[in-house]
Amino acid sequence: MMRAWTLPMLLVLCGSTAATGLIFKGSPGTAAALLLVFLALAGVNSPLIFPRSIGAREAQRRSAVDGRPVAYWRPGCTYCMRLRTRLGRSARQLHWVNIWHDPAGAAEVRAANNGNETVPTVVVAGQPHTNPDPRWVREQLSPSA
């Protein structure tokens, strides 16, 4: 778990250091703006944006049991962040697989996208959908999940 926080913490540290230097040079406005940019980058790359990822095999097993979709994603992907944020709380109903941490997940995505690791790829009822509209994904979620 600590490894997932390494990049966000480095971004906060770098942003804080750069902002401190700008404050001492007499540019508090620029320092505040720069710090906000670094904090936003840290937040986007933190585990807070996405629910906890699981392995592809476990996600497929769980999906077979509960019928919920499997979403393959990777950190830093703007389309993945768009899907996650537009789904809101209902994003927790999906099984999320980080393809950078799970080779089997990356292989599933490549198989669905002609050898490309295009994410987000959402698998609903065994059918992969590349970069689907968040409204469509929300419609696929069962109300009981």
Image (cartoon, rainbow, N blue to C red):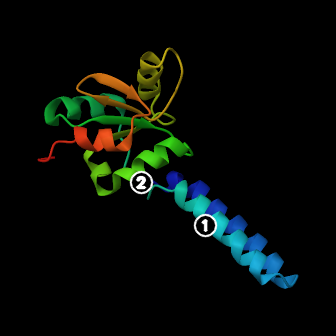
Q: Mark 1: give few (<14), some (14-19) or many (20+) Cα within 10 Å.
A: many
SS class of the residue under badge 2?
helix
**Residue at (27, 35) in percent of width and height:** 69
Residue 7 quadrant = bottom right
- Residues 5 and 121: in front is 121
Q: Position of residue 55 (x, y in %)?
A: 36, 34
Q: Earlier in the sequence, mark 1 or mark 2?
A: 1
SS class of the residue under badge 1?
helix
Residue 60 quadrant = top left
Q: Mark 2: give few (<14), some (14-19) or many (20+) Cα within 10 Å.
A: some
* On screen, residue 131 above or below 49: above
The residue wearing badge 2 is 85
- Residues 84 and 63: in front is 84
The residue wearing badge 1 is 39
Image side of residue 39 versus residue 54, left or right = right
Q: Position of residue 53 (x, y in %)?
A: 38, 44
